[in-house]
Amino acid sequence: MRRQVFGPLGMMSVGFGITTEGEPQGHHAGKVATLADANPAMFAPAGNLHLSMADWAKFCLDQMAGYHGHGKLLTPQTYRMMETRLPGATSGLSWGVQDSLAGFEGPVLTHAGSDGNWYALVALFPKTRSGILIAANAGEDMGGDKAARAATKALLPKVAKPPAAPAK
């Protein structure tokens, strides 16, 4: 991961496992998350990493560049495959793929998830090269998901094309 993804994109803040003291920390059940609250090691291939918002943005910018055939990590065909909805599905191989989000014009590449201690959400609008990255340092049990969705709703008008006006 460091050699093939983080290095080429200049992502220097990436760490594995939970954040340590002195870094922003996740929360679970009303307290700071500990190693006992972390995902089991079997989940590590699906993530189990932490990084700065700036480094996450570098990854997302590369995904949007890939949408236009100019990503640094993969061939244009591979980005296209990852970012195209599979037949009969709502997602591609790595992204949720939507025609719109809350009525705002897409296509929209989405992903949201939680390890129980954090909640993260991304909505990328590759045609306009804009997007939203949101992280809450609390999982669903403390409302991190609700806060992320509310922030997304508030930010959408700033980053996405509004719905087309109805024809008269």
Image (tube, grey):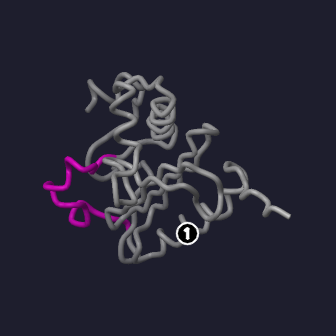
Magenta residue span? 32-49
At a point 50% along the width and 43% down the height, the residue shown is 53
The picture places residue 160, in percent across and down from the top left corner, at 67, 50
Question: Which residue of the protein is positioned furthest toward the front in this rendering?
Answer: 168
Say left or right for 97 vs 6.
right
Q: Determine which quarter of the picture holds residue 103.
A: bottom right
Q: Secondary structure at mark 1?
A: helix
In the rendered image, the vertical position of residue 72 relative to residue 63, given as above or below: above
Residue 27 quadrant: bottom left
The answer to if 47 sits in the magenta stretch is yes
Instruction: Please state which of residues 114 and 66 is positioned toward the viewer in this rendering.
Output: 66
Q: For the point 38% across and 72% down, which residue is it?
A: 31
**Residue 93 left/right relative to 27:** left
Residue 108 percent location from the top left of the image: 53, 50
* In the image, residue 153 lies in the stretch drawn in magenta: no
Q: Residue at x 40, y 45 (%)?
A: 84
Q: Is residue 102 above or below residue 12?
A: below
| Name of the residue lying farthest toward the right | 168
